[in-house]
Image (cartoon, rainbow, N blue to C red):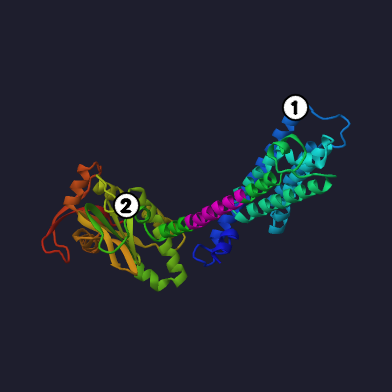
Amino acid sequence: MQLRAWFFPGAASAHGAPLPQRVQREFEREQFRGELLVTGVQLALVVLLTGLYASAPAGFSPDAPIEAVPLGLVFFAVLALVRLYTAWTGQLSKPVLAAGVVSEMLVLLFVIWATHLQYEQPLQFSLKSTQFVYVFILIGLRALRFEPVWVVISGLTAAAGWSLLVAMSVRSAPDNPITWDYVTSLRSIQVHPGGEFDKVLAVLVVTGVLALAIARARHLLERAVAQQRAVADLSRFFDDSVVRRITASEADVMAGQGEQRDAAILFLDMRGFTEAAMRLTPSDLIALLGEYQRLAVPIIKRHGGSIDKFLGDGILASFGAVTADASYAASALRAVDAVLVAVDAWRDTRLQTGQVAPDVGAGLATGPVVFGIIGDASRLEYTVIGDAVNLAAKLEKHNKAERTRAITTRAAYELALSQGYVGGKALRDARTVGGVVAPLDLAVLGDRR
């Protein structure tokens, strides 16, 4: 079953399960490009060989009954163009492709066979044709589709065709057609069975090795494409920076791994979401939440933030936790400023059309946090843990008491100023924040409209 999957890929993954349709479509696109590449190379060879043939001395009688090479090049070009047309129009089915692979090899063997007619020699003369080397070129070109089956078909056609040509040559000789003397075979038209066997064996060995190499490469390619798709899907569920850490990690990812860093934690919450939930249908509510998240998330990422998780209508983001950032506090405050501006424009647009337009509340705190993995073997999660995380959530709730939209601690604000943040913010000293023992000096990042 494994061998069959290697030589006839496309229906099953490396583990025997069917490949996802999107992965199969990706392979089909690559196979289409591969077929275009095969045809392009073949047509380029036709042009090159036509030029070489036209510029070379004839070397045969003008009265020869046939010119094999020009005839073969014409047939070959027609086959290539027909295959290109069927590929481009989506009509290149497996039977059509198989017929094309067999036909192109038969055209080459026909040219080799017709050599004795062109030079007006016995049929055995064809076995000495140097055009035999083009057999390996045709077999090799079939590898560009990354499907071993076409290499096998091409190689078997070549081996069977050459064996038939040898048999015809032996039978056509009137007497003494075979010699086991190598030198004699080179200097006469007698057939050396060992030499012809070597040719057929070389074709079969090259076909087998190339098919095996393609099968292994295809196997690895399937896994790579599946992993690439998985990474793309993961990036939709996890923050990009977290996905990069997971995929680039040289060690096994497991619970308990963590790093401590100084970071800024931002907690965003939609104001009036509960009221909106009572007025809107479930689909409209989800659409509203999607609009808000599509607005805020890109802004956070643009300023170097990482989304830790979505908490219903809330967003927990970190700056400098996933990846060290020397200006994490300044980046966080710039992100808050940009989010507030964007939310104001978003709300104005919705209000003008008579739609529900919730506001946003933000709490920001800085301090040492641990960024790491929690969970068990069956369910892991990257997250940030520390006092700054809890404080950011408490500050967000404290906006109601201060009648503000966004606040942070004075220490975080001054740290941001030292890191290059520009912007004057109102300060409020010794404020009592719920859940915090000692009074805090705060900085107002945004007032209510």
Horizontally, residue 112 falls left or right of residue 329, namely right
Frontmost of labels 2 and 1 is 1
Q: Is residue 330 left or right of residue 239?
A: left
Placement of the N terminus among the 4 image quadrants: bottom right
Sequence-wise first label, 2 or 1: 1
For the residue pair 311 and 231, the one nearer the viewer reads as 231
Q: State the extent of the magenta-drawn residues as a range.
A: 205-225
Q: Is residue 70 left or right of residue 380?
A: right
Q: Which quadrant is the C terminus positioned in?
A: bottom left
What is the C-alpha distance between the residues marked 2 and 1? 68 Å
Is 417 located above or below residue 368 in the figure?
above
Q: Is residue 270 magenta?
A: no
What secondary structure is the stretch in magenta mostly built from? helix
Whether residue 351 is visible here, answered yes or no, is no
Residue drawn at (24%, 41%) of the image: 420
Q: Are marks 2 and 1 in contact (CB under 8 Å)?
A: no
Instruction: Confirm whether residue 287 shows in the render.
Output: yes
Quick one: label 2, few (<14), some, or many (20+) residues within 10 Å? many
Q: Name the residue: 85% across, 37% down.
A: 66
In the structure shown, which secondary structural element does the residue marked by tag 2 occupy?
strand
Q: Amino acid at mark 2?
A: Gly
The residue singled out by tag 1 in the image is 56
Residue drawn 14% across and 57% down?
440
Q: Is residue 419 left or right of residue 343?
A: left
Which sits in the foreground, 203 or 103? Answer: 203
Residue occupied by mark 2: 305
Secondary structure under badge 1? loop
Was residue 217 drawn as part of the magenta stretch in this picture? yes
Residue 107: horizontal and vertical position, in percent? Answer: 76, 45
- Percent x, y of residue 423: 25, 44
